[in-house]
Amino acid sequence: MSGPGRYYNRRLEVWRTSTVPDGAGGETTTEVLVARIRAQVDQPSPTERLIAQQAASSHSHNVYTDPRADVRRGDELRGADPLGQMQHFRVQSVVWPSRPIYAKALCELTQSEGG
């Protein structure tokens, strides 16, 4: 296998918020499973963290995926870390290099209460 895909060592689910009319003039918001993707999760560099902090943004992880993966700002990426603990990442933005061999999602690791 060539290219960055050989480094994608995690499987993540892409969840997206969907809003539909409820029939009574309001809306119902649900989370929908959009896709299951392969990814590489890394910590950002100190420079990336500094830039995010200056922009009043939270950036705790970089998630690298195939450039054709349907990952968008606002999505939640869910999956187990190498120790089996569930992790949820909120996508802050997605960028591609000038030659799109991967997509890089700048994410914030979120924690939830309970199990």
Image: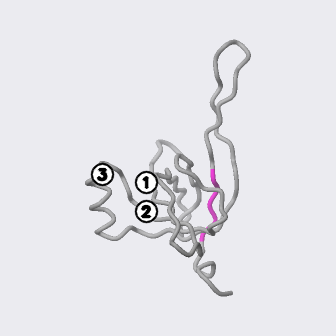
Q: Disc 3 residue type?
A: Ala
Between 21 and 97, the one nearer to me in the picture: 97
Q: Which residues are magenta?
A: 10-14
Q: Earlier in the sequence, mark 1 or mark 3?
A: 3
> What colour scheme does the image use?
one colour
Residue 63: horizontal and vertical position, in percent?
A: 51, 65
Residue holding disc 1: 108
Q: Earlier in the sequence, mark 1 or mark 2?
A: 2
Residue holding disc 2: 61
Disc 1 vs disc 2: Cβ atoms closer than 8 Å? yes
Mark 3 or 2: in front is 3
| In the depicted structure, whether residue 16 falls above or below residue 108 | above
- SS label for mark 2: strand
Q: Disc 2 residue type?
A: His
Count of marks placed on residues: 3
Between 40 and 69, the one nearer to me in the picture: 69
Q: Disc 1 residue type?
A: Glu
The N terminus: image quadrant:
bottom right
- SS label for mark 1: strand
Instruction: Identify the image quadrant of residue 100.
Output: bottom right
